[in-house]
Amino acid sequence: MFDRHSGGESAILVHIDFDQEANQEDLQEFVELVRSAGLKVMDIITAKRHTPDPKFFIGKGKIDEILSAKQATDANVVIFNHNLSPAQERNIEQVVKCRVIDRIGLILDIFAQRAFTFEGKLQVELAQLRHLSTRLVRGWTHLERQKGGIGMRGPGETQLETDRRLVRDRIKYIEKRLDKVGRQREQGRRSRKRANIKTVSIVGYTNAGKSTLFNRLTEAEVLAEDKLFATLDPTLRRVSLPQGSDVILADTVGFIRHLPHELVAAFRATLEESVEADVLLHVIDAASERRDENIEQVMEVLSDIGADKIRTLEVYNKIDMIEGAKPRIDRDSEGLPIRVWTSAVEDQGIDLLLQALEELAEEKQFQARLQLPPQEGRLRGLLYELQAVENEDSGDNGDMILDVRLDESDWIRLGRQLGKDLSQFVLSS
């Protein structure tokens, strides 16, 4: 690592508009992220570029502008709305003489503030260590650090090698602990499946009102603030539906534009509540000017974690901020609910949401006897993963005879996943 300046609470923000879509970020969201981190915005510097500068990311003129703004405002940290290389961070810090943080560093800082449970803290530390491992750019100058003991004398490890080894060891330790937590979560999910209790996972763009809606549905007291990533640790609660059946509702971390891969990887155990859910409630800020963009970003993350094929009910929230909007249910051509318009804050449309949830949760079951040839081992394995196999026998010709029961949507999703017409395997239903 290189010597870093200490951070602070007053920030100068740097936002660059690039021609390349991959480098484009949203300025308004950036400001909200910084405020969510508890920082005071002293100045915002913007510019346009075709491509990032290899040495400073921005031009030398903008570096001088940052230095002038820092001196004028007494700001003690500069935050970029982009991902910087370790060398770029170091080069900028040497000129502006204060701490420089990029977008990933900012989001990691927010996550560190929001982690309260043991699992959440482990996940944040894992993400921080993975990010740090890319920042170990050189060791200390002395190369003669020695290990003691017979056969261990000599130049020994450089400090860089030592740091990398310590980081690797800590990452492995945390991954083992998170694997254990993940297995415990899997046991809980299996118990719910055996009890035939559906799981409904709330997903959506950060600050769309997920936690407020969760609290309204469950009468829980999950932290709900007008801040990005107010919820980090997943919370599960049982909810009773109008006709008396129950579902498990899970509140999860919010998504964001270009969610760093370190965070997607570190929070995979948490996001598994979404991957394994029977129904997703995609909460959308209906009043947001960037509604369509936010929906697209959420679908991108769901695709990344393998949850894009799960039946989804869209919840257009915050209709109290849209003139003339009323609570309602939108349905597809088959009459199934696809969208509910609500206001969690004003308690509007919550009864309609529960009604729509019940219709999806009390879904029609597919029950049949299947005859699978030996080459259909993958389909058999997926049916067992869904705990859909009630009985299995062997046919005279070596085929597998399975009695299965599962949700009709799961059966349809299996066909799509495998790209096959599964009806060819049905003996009787």
Image: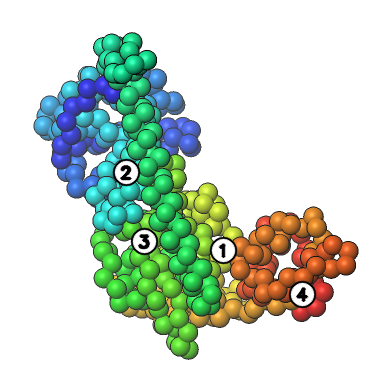
Give the image quarter of residue 142.
top left
The residue furthest right is 397
- Left or right: 35, with 393 as reference point: left
Asked if marks 1 and 2 touch (Cβ < 8 Å), the reply is no
Residue 323 visible (yes or no): no
Asked if marks 1 and 3 touch (Cβ < 8 Å), the reply is no
Q: Earlier in the sequence, mark 4 or mark 2?
A: 2
Instruction: Label 1: state its secondary structure.
Output: loop
The residue furthest bottom is 243
Position of residue 361 relative to residue 185, above or below, is below
Rendered residue at 47%/70% (across/down): 200
Residue 134 visible (yes or no): yes
Colour pattern of the rendering: rainbow
Q: Earlier in the sequence, mark 3 or mark 4?
A: 3
Q: Which residue is mark 2?
A: 125
Q: What x and y, as percent, mark residue 212?
A: 31, 68
Instruction: Label 3: state its secondary structure.
Output: loop
Q: Earlier in the sequence, mark 1 or mark 2?
A: 2
Q: Which amino acid does the dot numbered 1 rest on? A: Ile
Position of residue 292 relative to residue 334, above or below, is above
Q: Which amino acid does the dot numbered 3 rest on? A: Pro
Q: Which residue is mark 3?
A: 234
Instruction: Label 4: state its secondary structure.
Output: strand
Q: Which amino acid does the dot numbered 4 rest on? A: Arg
As measured in the structure, the alpha-carbon distance from the residue carrying label 4 to the one carrying label 2 is 48 Å
Which mark is nearer the camera, 1 or 2?
2
Q: Which residue is mark 1?
A: 310
Q: Which residue is mark 4?
A: 369
